[in-house]
Image (spheres, rainbow, N blue to C red):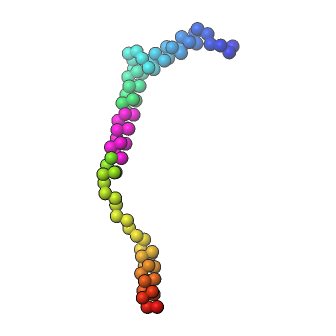
Amino acid sequence: MGGLSIWHWMLFAMVALLLFGGKGKISDIMGDVAKGIKSFKKGMAEDDDEAKAAPPAPRLENRADASVDAKEKETNKVG
């Protein structure tokens, strides 16, 4: 019961042939999936290149922090 018979190996070989070889719809689908993955990776690489080329966005400070800093500067000037 633990071993695989010749029928198991033949069935496995037929499924592998359908998925990865031969002329059929499944092999065409597998090729399309591979093309999709390649184009996805290419698109991600282009996005990374654009992000590196773009200048960094200006930092906006929190208004509450700016008002506290202004008040501290005023108190330091007076005292």
Find residue 26 and report its image quarter. Answer: top left
Residue closest to the eye, 70 or 77: 77
Residue 46 highlighted magenta (yes or no) = yes
What residue is at 43 percent from the left and 83 percent from the top? Answer: 73
Magenta span: 37-48
* Residue at left offset 34%, top offset 64%: 58
Q: Report the front residue among 30 and 72.
A: 72
The percent position of residue 54, horizontal first and vertical second, equals 30, 54
Q: Residue furthest right?
A: 1
| Overall secondary structure of the magenta section | helix
Residue at image point 31% right, 57% down: 55
Q: Residue extending furthest bottom?
A: 78
Q: Position of residue 44 (x, y in %)?
A: 37, 42
Numbered label tally: 0
Q: Quadrant of the N terminus?
A: top right
Compared across the picture, whether 6 is left or right of 40 comes to: right
Q: Residue furthest top?
A: 6
Q: Position of residue 9 (x, y in %)?
A: 56, 12
Which of the 4 quarters of the picture holds residue 23? top left
Above or below residue 39? Residue 6 is: above
Vertical position of residue 4 compared to residue 75: above or below:
above
Q: Residue at x 40, y 21 (%)?
A: 27
Is residue 14 placed above or below 58 in the rendered structure?
A: above
> Could you say where residue 31 lies in the image, as x and y percent from the top left?
38, 25
